[in-house]
Image (cartoon, rainbow, N blue to C red):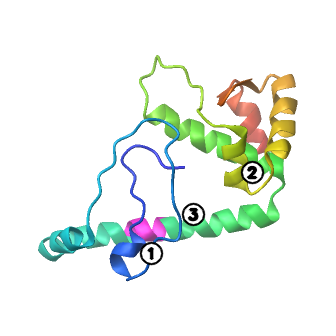
Amino acid sequence: MLEQGQWFGEVSLFIDAPRVYDTRAIVDCELLVVPAQAFHGIIDGRPDFLMEFIRLICRRYRWALEWIDETILQPLPVRLARRLLAAQHAHLLSVPEDTEAALRLSQEDLGQMLGVSRQSINRQLKEWESQQLLRLEYGRVTVLDQDALRRLA
């Protein structure tokens, strides 16, 4: 899940190949498209920018390895708790303090992120809702007990 100010599609700037993934917005947003030629003009004039992109790609590579590890080794409750906590952390960084902390995440979206069915996500979320760890609304999840989710993660 990407948040405000994050890049995607940067690999295709360095190798002549199409992007290997797509994205879709779940809220209204504005995008800045940087054509490859413009990007190369920027880094030719400012080599320090190239180092920032190398760091970005390394962070993405590390995230991919961690995701593979978690997907293979961790059970759904652990993976889902981690995903909700990460999404909530990113969401809280991008909204004013007095804004409700409900995450705009559908069960279908969560299932796709974690590689499981929407039904599996629904069962786990309903269990946690009955334990008052979170509140479910159509297309939204509000975390009520971060500490409990952290213990599960």
Residue named by callout 1:
18
Comparing 103 with 153, the one in front is 103
Gap in angstroms between the C-alphas marked 1 and 2: 29 Å
Comparing 114 with 108, the one in front is 108
Gap in angstroms between the C-alphas marked 3 and 2: 14 Å
Image quarter of residue 149? top right
Disc assigned to residue 63: 3
Question: Above or below — where is 98 with respect to 123?
Answer: above
Residue interval drawn in magenta? 55-59
Image quarter of residue 64? bottom right
- N-terminal of the pair, mark 3 or mark 2, is 3
Q: Is residue 121 a member of the stretch shown in magenta? A: no
Residue named by callout 2:
79
Q: Is there a contact, CB below 8 Å, between mark 1 and mark 2?
A: no
Assess disc 2: are there few (<14), some (14-19) or many (≥20) residues with their C-alpha within 10 Å of its C-alpha: some
Question: Which element carries disc 1, helix, strand or loop?
Answer: loop
Which residue is drawn at the image coordinates 69% and 52% (left, top)?
112
- N-terminal of the pair, mark 1 or mark 2, is 1
Nearer the observer: mark 1 or 2; the answer is 1
Question: Which element carries disc 3, helix, strand or loop?
Answer: helix
- What is the magenta segment's predominant secondary structure? helix
Question: Where's residue 3, x and y in %?
Answer: 45, 45
Question: Where's residue 46, x and y in %?
Answer: 15, 70
